[in-house]
Image (spheres, grey):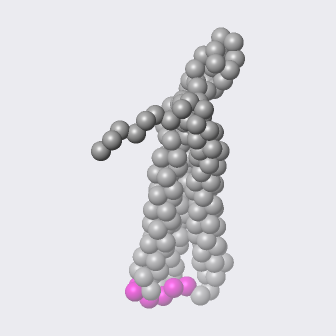
Amino acid sequence: MKDQPDLPVNERLTVLNTLYPWYKEEVFRRREQMMRLTAFACSFLLLLLFMLLITPDQPIRHLTVKVLASVGVVGFAGLFGYLILQQRERHRMAKQALIDIERALGLYEEGIFLEGQTLYPASWQTAWLGDRSVIVYLALIVALTVLVVAAVLASSS
C-alpha cells in the first residue's frame, strides 16, 4: 500500500476550521441533552411523588402492587441514568476531539494570536475532566426515586 502524501497546510486548516464549529456544537448539544433528560426524569418523579402525597385517601393497598410500582420507578430512573451516562460519554469524546482541534489550530500556543500570551488559557484543556455535573444530575434522580419508592411503600396497607 502506498503512503498518502500529507495534506498541504492550507487544506489542513480548512478541514480544521470546518470541523471546529461542528464539534463545538456537538459538545453543547450533548450537555443540553443531559440537562433535558434530567429535567424530564425529575419532573416525572416529582409528579409521581405529588400524586402519591395528595391522594392519601386512595392508598396502594396490595404489597404486590407496591413492589411492582417501586420496580417500575427504579427501572424508569435507571433508564434515565443510563441515558445520561451515555450522553456524558459522547460529550467527553466530542470535548476531547474539540480540544485536539483547538491545539492543532494553535489556540493554546503563546504568541500566535496575541503577543506574549495564548488565545485560550491552558487550563481549558483539562478543566472539563473535573466536571461534576453528571453527579448532580444522577444524585437528583436517585434522591427523587428514593422519595417516590418510600411514598409508595409507606402508603397505608
| Above or below 92: residue 9 | above
List x then y, in percent, for residue 45: 58, 69
Q: Main secondary structure of the magenta part?
A: loop
Q: Residue at x 58, y 25 (%)?
A: 106
Asked if residue 33 can be seen in this view, the reply is: yes
Residue 116 vs residue 155, the one in the foreground = 116
- The answer to whether 13 appears left or right of 135 in the picture is right
Q: Nearer the viewer, residue 134 or 21?
A: 21
Residue that extends furthest to the left in the rendered view of this protein: 1
| The stretch drawn in magenta includes residue 102 | no
Q: Quadrant of residue 18?
A: top right
- Exactly how many numbered labels are in the figure? 0
Horizontal and vertical percent position of residue 70? 45, 76
**Most foreground residue, 76 or 17:** 17
On screen, residue 93 above or below 34: above
Give the x, y percent position of residue 47: 64, 73
Counting from the top left corner in percent of width and height, residue 82 is at 45, 62
Tell me where the magenta segment starts and ends, as one range: 59-64
Is 115 located above or below residue 8 in the figure?
A: above
Name the residue nearer the viewer: 6 or 95. 6
Image quarter of the N terminus: top left
Say if residue 143 shows up in the picture: no
Residue located 60% across and 75% down the image: 48
Residue furthest to the right: 114
Tell me if residue 28 comes above or below residue 118 in the rendering: below
Residue found at the very far top of the displayed protein: 116
Residue at point 53%, 70% (across, down) = 148
Q: What residue is rendered at 46% in x and 51% in y? A: 89
Instruction: Say which quarter of the image contains residue 15.
Output: top right
Asked if residue 11 lies left or right of residue 4, the reply is right
